[in-house]
Amino acid sequence: MQRVLLILGILLISLNLRPALASVGPLVESIRGATGLSNAALGLLTTLPLLAFGIVSALTPLATRRLGTEGALAAALSLVAVGTLARAAPSTAPLFGGTVLFGVGIALGNVLLPSLVKRDFPEHSGVMTSLYSSGIGAGAAIGAGTTVPLAGALGWRGALGAWAVPAVAALLVWLPQLRAGAPARASYDIGASLRALARSSLAWQVALFMGLQSLTFYIALAWLPGFLQARGFDPAAAGGLLALSQVMGVAGSAVVPTWAARRADQRRTICLLALVEGTALAGLAWPGAPLASLWVSVLGFVLGGTFGLALLLLVLRAADAETATELSGMAQSVGYLVAAAGPAVFGLLHDLTGGWAAPLALLAFALVAKTAVGLRAGRPGQIRPGR
């Protein structure tokens, strides 16, 4: 029963790592109309969590040193619940303050799940990574898809605050793990360990793979609808295709890690994913974007699969759970800081050139670079304490 509760807890945590973030986009116009916030201020509601991911991820080992992995995950769920609920308060200050709080909580959860899989499921890392990475994607899809109906019933503030309920439910399921978990290590020299990690070329290869896949994903999330509209699709159809890509991303993150974990060397998997991604991008870039539904589905699947593979590498390339925490923190810090710049650079290239050739060239460059570092990160090998 303890094992079942642990797996259920991991799934519920993963499902709570994106709804608070994904629920903002569908309500932007409602928030603007009620608060009078500028576009720049509204943009902060998405940017602040990404910045929190980038900054807090690298500091997560400090939390595990004090609280242990189980305690830090309980703190993460608490921050998600409190921060999400704060956004329902009738003023703008809690809207932004709550956004920062849940951003910190999500960052902790992002980093710690690979560490937990490494420690408790070393022989089933592929299956467990598939479980929680697809849970993350499903949470995002649920958040984006149900927030507008919730707003119709509860108002936009109530719809934002409602996502505290599943976070509290996950926390209640997780509480028994606090008694069963390993104690924190007060004597752990985190500074020396992180400095040693920064000297590992393998660690940087894994981190850059995470960063480049995040870059492509967030560019697609931000710009795919606009790109499709420029190809002649109406806004509703473009939005529907974006939703299709997200659903296929859940499938990709469910399938690829389990498949890739069956072998010690992931380079063939990385090459295959790169080939499929390049084909999908070429199909979408073709004038008129024929077979757009097919190419969007393929792109969504491969981006979800690459995300799941990046998470799997955090588990496979770390020799133990503590190293997995540090590597996950480093890789996700790099990943989200790189990802935060991606949509802006893509948009800037579009503004400067007035077309899509230069922005698409950015995606092509990212694909080549991601494949190059992936061929190094995918080789058999592990990062060990002391490196």
Image (spheres, rainbow, N blue to C red):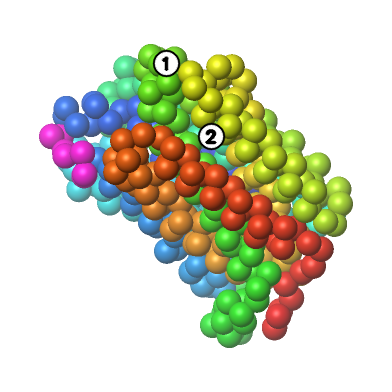
- Mark 1: few, some, or many residues within 10 Å (few <14, many ≥20)? some
Viewer can see residue 141: no
Q: Nearer the viewer, residue 36 or 201?
A: 201
- 21 to the left or right of 318: left
Judged from this view, the residue extending furthest toward the left is 36
Q: Which residue in the structure is indicated by mark 2?
A: 139
Write the residue at 70% across / 40% down: 275
In the rendered structure, are the residues bearing label 2 and label 1 in contact, judged by CB atoms less than 8 Å apart? Answer: no
Measured as percent of width and height from the top left, residue 180 is found at: 70, 59
Q: Nearer the viewer, residue 110 or 116?
A: 110
Residue 113, magenta (yes or no) = no
At label 1, which amino acid type do we have?
Phe
The magenta region covers 35-41
Measured as percent of width and height from the top left, residue 33 is found at: 16, 27
Disc 1 on helix, strand or loop?
Answer: loop
Write the residue at 48% across / 18% down: 288
Q: Quick check: 68 above or below 200?
A: above
Q: Nearer the viewer, residue 291 or 51?
A: 291
Write the residue at 83% across / 56% down: 265
Disc 2 on helix, strand or loop?
Answer: helix
Question: Mark 2 and mark 1: span between their CA atoms?
Answer: 27 Å
- 105 to the left or right of 251: left
